[in-house]
Structure formats: structure tokens, C-alpha cells
């Protein structure tokens, strides 16, 4: 008979499943800061995809991070509406009000492409954390967008997956097995590499990153800025990984970049 410790020991299979399963909570719905917005639903491989939109003018798409939801980006809404933009927010697959229990960067990128069928070309996208990586992936695969603002962007999905496996208690051999399992499920973590993608993308890019970010080190933002021709990097102090989304100086910088 196995002991409780043995029963709970992580395996490549269990960790791969956890890697693709975002934790969710009951945080404030987006409509709490987006009164008057129209709720729009479409359907993709993961099921129902929920988005909200309001305003008239060039479209700005706001993309939340892993285990987040559209309301995380709510602080950007009033300034963008005041500046004359149409604002679109989306709950990514398996997040917020959208359907699904598992997801990945490729799946979320595909969802943005599906969303574009509804909303048309995007003037600018403002994304946070893993949302940055999936937005770049969507652009790489055909999302029409003229400008990008990446807030606390990670660099490589492979590194993220390896770190997840190690933190879960897998050894090196088990991590390799986990990566192989993800590959078998159509999630090629090695293919999602923002610095490498930068060579083929020409959109003007602004990166906003806090020096004290403990989730996504600012060194990764620097690496992406160095790889992306013409990219601008603004670094801040004391804003961490999530507080940065509420900082007036960050929101002002993003809005100013869209109008230059």
C-alpha cells in the first residue's frame, strides 16, 4: 500500500495537466468598471468566448494574463475612452466568463484571432504578463494590429514550463517528460519565444516593466526590447507585477504611446 506522500507525489502527467489548468476566482466582473459596454459572445475550439466593447474610434484590445480576467485591465478603460478609442476586453479561454477548463498560450492566441473576426483590425493591443506572449503569438499568426504595449512580458514559454515543473517538484527527467506530454497535446512550448519572434515583427512596441517584478524579471523585458527593432522600454520602481496595472504613470505612458 502506498503512503499518502507517495499518492500525492507529482508526476509528469499531473503537472502537465496543472500547467494547462488556470486557477480561477470570483473577482469583480468587468462590467463593474465598464458600464454601458456591450457584451459579445463568439465560439471557438474552447467553447464560448466572452468579450466587451464600448466607444467609437480606433480599436484598442486589452489582454489580461494567465489566471487573470478582463477586469484586471479595467484601469485603462476610462482614459482610452476619453482619448477617443473603441475599447475591447476579452476573457481568455478558461478564464473569467469564457468557457473551458484548460488553456495554453497557443489556444489563447487562436482565440484572439477568432475575436478579430468579430471586431475587425486592431489599432493597438495592450497586454499584461503571459497575455503579452499570447498576443505576440497571435500577431505572428495573423492578428492585425498596428501598435503593441507589453506590460511585464515573459520571454519564452519553454522556460515558464520548466520553471513550473521544477516548482511542482519534478526532477529533470520528469520535466522533460512533462514537456513531451504537452507537445503530444499540441502545446509546443519551445515554439513560443517572444525575443525570437521579434525578428519578424515590425510593429512599434512599448514595454512597461517594474524593476522589482518578482514574477517576470525586468531582465526579460530588457531582452525583448533589445531584440525588437525600435522598441521602447520604460522601467518603473516599486510597482511589482500586478500593481503596475493600476499605476497612473503606466496608464499615461501607454495612452501617450498610442497617440504618437
Image (cartoon, helix red, strand yellow):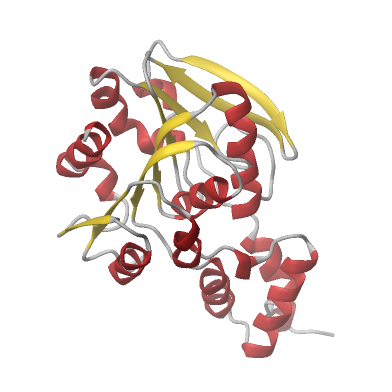
Q: Position of residue 27 (x, y in %)?
A: 44, 36
Could you say which is closer to the camera, residue 209 or residue 9? 209
On screen, residue 248 versus residue 66, left or right, reads left
Q: Position of residue 64 (x, y in %)?
A: 44, 43
Up-down: is 167 above or below 25? below
Q: Is residue 121 visible?
A: yes
Up-down: is 134 above or below 119? below
Q: Quadrant of residue 236?
A: bottom left
On screen, residue 30 versus residue 17, left or right, reads left
Q: How many marks?
A: 0
Please give the name of the residue rendered at 52% of the width and 75% of the height, measured from the top-left corner. Answer: 163
Could you say which is closer to the camera, residue 10 or residue 182? 182
Up-down: is 166 above or below 97? below
Please give the name of the residue rendered at 48% of the width and 39% of the height, measured from the top-left corner. Answer: 69
Q: Position of residue 175 (x, y in %)?
A: 65, 81
Could you say which is closer to the camera, residue 8 or residue 175? 175
Q: Quadrant of residue 260?
A: top left
Up-down: is 232 above or below 247? below
Please give the name of the residue rendered at 62% of the width and 33% of the height, measured from the top-left corner. Answer: 98
On screen, residue 208 versus residue 192, left or right, reads left
Amino acid at each position: 500500500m502506498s503512503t499518502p506522500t507517495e499518492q500525492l507525489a507529482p508526476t509528469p502527467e499531473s503537472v502537465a495537466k496543472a500547467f494547462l489548468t488556470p486557477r480561477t476566482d470570483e473577482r469583480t466582473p468587468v462590467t463593474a468598471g465598464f458600464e454601458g459596454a456591450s457584451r459579445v459572445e463568439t465560439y471557438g475550439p474552447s467553447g464560448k468566448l466572452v468579450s466587451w466593447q464600448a466607444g467609437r474610434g480606433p480599436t484598442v484590445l486589452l489582454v489580461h494574463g494567465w489566471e487573470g480576467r478582463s477586469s484586471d485591465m479595467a484601469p485603462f478603460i476610462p482614459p482610452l475612452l476619453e482619448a477617443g478609442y473603441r475599447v475591447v476586453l476579452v476573457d481568455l479561454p478558461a478564464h473569467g466568463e469564457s468557457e473551458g477548463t484548460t488553456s495554453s498560450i497557443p489556444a489563447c492566441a487562436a482565440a484572439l484571432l477568432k475575436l478579430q473576426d468579430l471586431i475587425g483590425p486592431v489599432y493597438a493591443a495592450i497586454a499584461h504578463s503571459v497575455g503579452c506572449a499570447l498576443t505576440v503569438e497571435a500577431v505572428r499568426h495573423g492578428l492585425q494590429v498596428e501598435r503593441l504595449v507589453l506590460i511585464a512580458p515573459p520571454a519564452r514559454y519553454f522556460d515558464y514550463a520548466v520553471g513550473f515543473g521544477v516548482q511542482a517538484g519534478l526532477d529533470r527527467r520528469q520535466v522533460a517528460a512533462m514537456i513531451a506530454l504537452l507537445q503530444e497535446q499540441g502545446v509546443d512550448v519551445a515554439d513560443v519565444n517572444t525575443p525570437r519572434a521579434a525578428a519578424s515583427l515590425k510593429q512599434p512596441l512599448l514595454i512597461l516593466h517594474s524593476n522589482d517584478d518578482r514574477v517576470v524579471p525586468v531582465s526579460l523585458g530588457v531582452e525583448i526590447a533589445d531584440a525588437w527593432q525600435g522598441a521602447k522600454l520604460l522601467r518603473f520602481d516599486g510597482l511589482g507585477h500586478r500593481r503596475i496595472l493600476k499605476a497612473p504613470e503606466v496608464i499615461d505612458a501607454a495612452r501617450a504611446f498610442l497617440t504618437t
